[in-house]
Image (cartoon, rainbow, N blue to C red):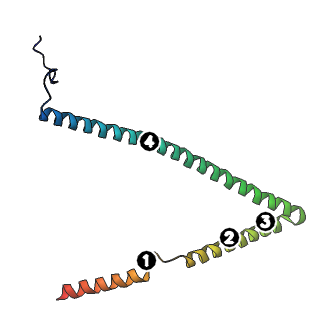
Amino acid sequence: MSDWDDGSPAKDQRPSVGRLLEQVTENISRVVRTEIALIKAELTAKITAAAIGIGLFVVAALLAFFVLVYLIFAGYLGLAHAFPDWLAALLTAVGLLVIIAVLALVGKKSLDRSTPPISPETKERLKKDVSAIKEGATS
């Protein structure tokens, strides 16, 4: 027999309650650390995928912007065959201004129809609270 004791009970002995509690806390700690590591790995994978997706959307939006510029220029060149250059440029600019005005009006209408961020009931409650605080502060 050796004098070395690894903390485990002998074959004929049961572990003590203290030793069992120690093992339980070690196991719980190990499980929690493992879960945290798994969550970190999962979040890292998801964030990486999201970053790649966002990057691809940015590139697509940039290319779409350049395509739009080329389409506007192509419209100008088409008008330049029928009209003098200055008039083709003016017609292209006026057409773009009309499109901008329509988009701005539709956007304004959409914003006007949207509900206010704070409901009227909440505003009333806030007014009552403020007045109650003012009355309490003055008395």
User: Mark 1 and mark 2: span between their CA atoms?
Assistant: 30 Å
The earlier-in-sequence mark between 2 and 4 is 4
In the rendered image, which residue does mark 1 sit on?
Answer: 118
Q: Is residue 25 left or right of residue 47?
A: left
Residue 21 location, quadrant? top left
Q: Which residue is painted at 12% across and 31% down in the image?
A: 16
Regarding mark 2 in the picture, which secondary structure is present there?
A: helix
Amino acid type shown at disc 4: Glu
User: Which mark is nearer the camera, 1 or 2?
Assistant: 1
The earlier-in-sequence mark between 1 and 2 is 2
Residue 20 location, quadrant? top left
User: Mark 2 and mark 4: span between their CA atoms?
Assistant: 44 Å
Q: How busy is the neighbourhood of tag 3: few (under 14 within 10 Å), some, or many (20 plus)?
A: some
In the rendered image, which residue does mark 2 sit on?
Answer: 100
User: Mark 3 and mark 2: span between their CA atoms?
Assistant: 16 Å
Tell me whether circle 2 and circle 4 mark residues in contact (CB < 8 Å).
Answer: no
The earlier-in-sequence mark between 3 and 1 is 3
In the rendered image, which residue does mark 3 sit on?
Answer: 89
User: Which mark is nearer the camera, 3 or 2?
Assistant: 2
Regarding mark 1 in the picture, which secondary structure is present there?
A: loop
Please tell me which residue lies in front, 40 or 101.
40
Quadrant containing the C terminus is bottom left
